[in-house]
Image: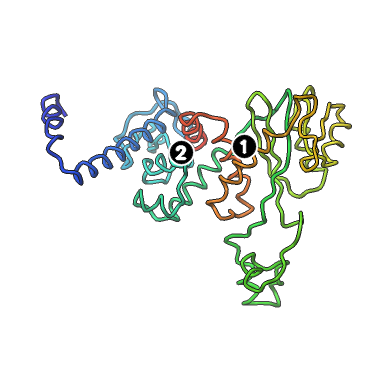
Amino acid sequence: MDAKSFRRLRGELGSLTGPQLKALTSALRSLDARMQAIGAIERRREGDAICPYCQHNKTSRWGSARTGVQRMRCALCHRTFSSSTGTAVARIHSPAGVHQVIADMFSDHPRSCRRLGLALGFDKMTIWRWRQKIIRAIGGSGASDLGGVVEADEKFFRESRKGSREWVRHQRDPIHDPKPDRMRWVDYKRTRTHMPAGISKYQIPVLTMADRAGSRRADVLPDHSAPPLVAVLAQRLRPDAVLRSDRDPAYDLFARQNGMPHYRIDAKKGPFVIDRAFHIQTINSLHDRFERFMAPFRGPATKNLAGYAAWFIARSVRAEHDRVENAWDGLMAA
């Protein structure tokens, strides 16, 4: 658009009605998301792109894909490709939609897949699949090693087999498909059956760690036994760290094996602060935010719990702009 046409367009904005202005705002927001998504994809290509099929470095521009991304053509194998070829967004027809989903995931109040789908004009399952791609891309978010004064504790989530067909298969063929080891959680309430009490195998532990420098980490453990907890602590904590935890003997075992200073705090009886410096209030606050973050998802499947934990940590340790950029970097990693 030339300058004269743009001035005419800007001058006519004052004559728009309320619904027209709302529709224009929505269109501009979608266009901005499209341009940001294309920019994030194109940043992967610097100068002349290398052919992903034959690794030849002599390529030329060859129009653009229907998503708006620049298409390239190899001079050797004559195949066309773009910056998204071989990435998690290669077959997604709406990069702008993905960008809006990423922005929503790292906003103050992420919406459910259903509500976000209605707002963006996509099916809820499309939003869910995109969200799973993004969660896998940011997997492993958080500090790989924590030092100084480190607080550690476990947060337990009820096991979820959401999406499982085990009961359906059992009812269809009881001989070849054995009865699952527990009822669905909703059936405990319907039949007024007592749920497993305390910490059982149906409570999935997530080991969370935080140090005073602001580093955070959350790792899903296979069970509540000491060996996996000790293994993760050995992998994540620096040798010069000072460990603070509750009275779980597994932490004491790790500290003795590694000669690490350890302050054990009884979260029920106290004292809650030792030497006016050592407490576990930081990790307790992190657990409170973690629980509130997970509440709207109504218990995601346990197989996806590690991804949701990484999503929560990514929201906790980065600014919103950096979170979006990091998610795109993960999606564009071949």
- The answer to whether 43 is drawn above or below residue 226 in the figure is above
- The answer to whether 159 is drawn above or below residue 137 in the figure is below
Q: How far across and down, in percent of the image, does residue 198 sit?
A: 76, 56
Q: Is residue 154 left or right of residue 24?
A: right
The amino acid type found where label 1 is placed reads Gly
What crowding class fits label 1: few (fewer than 14 Cα within 10 Å), some (14-19), or many (20 or more)?
some
Q: Using the image as rendered, state which of residue 178 and residue 310 is in the foreground.
A: 310
* Element carrying mark 1: loop
Q: Is residue 18 left or right of residue 66?
A: left
Residue at image coords 21%, 41%: 21
The amino acid type found where label 2 is placed reads Ser
Number of numbered discs on residues? 2
Q: How far across and down, in percent of the image, does residue 142 sit?
A: 62, 32
Q: Which residue is mark 1?
A: 140
Q: Which residue is mark 2?
A: 107
Quarter of the image containing the N terminus? top left
Q: Using the image as rendered, state which of residue 126 and residue 108 is in the foreground.
A: 108
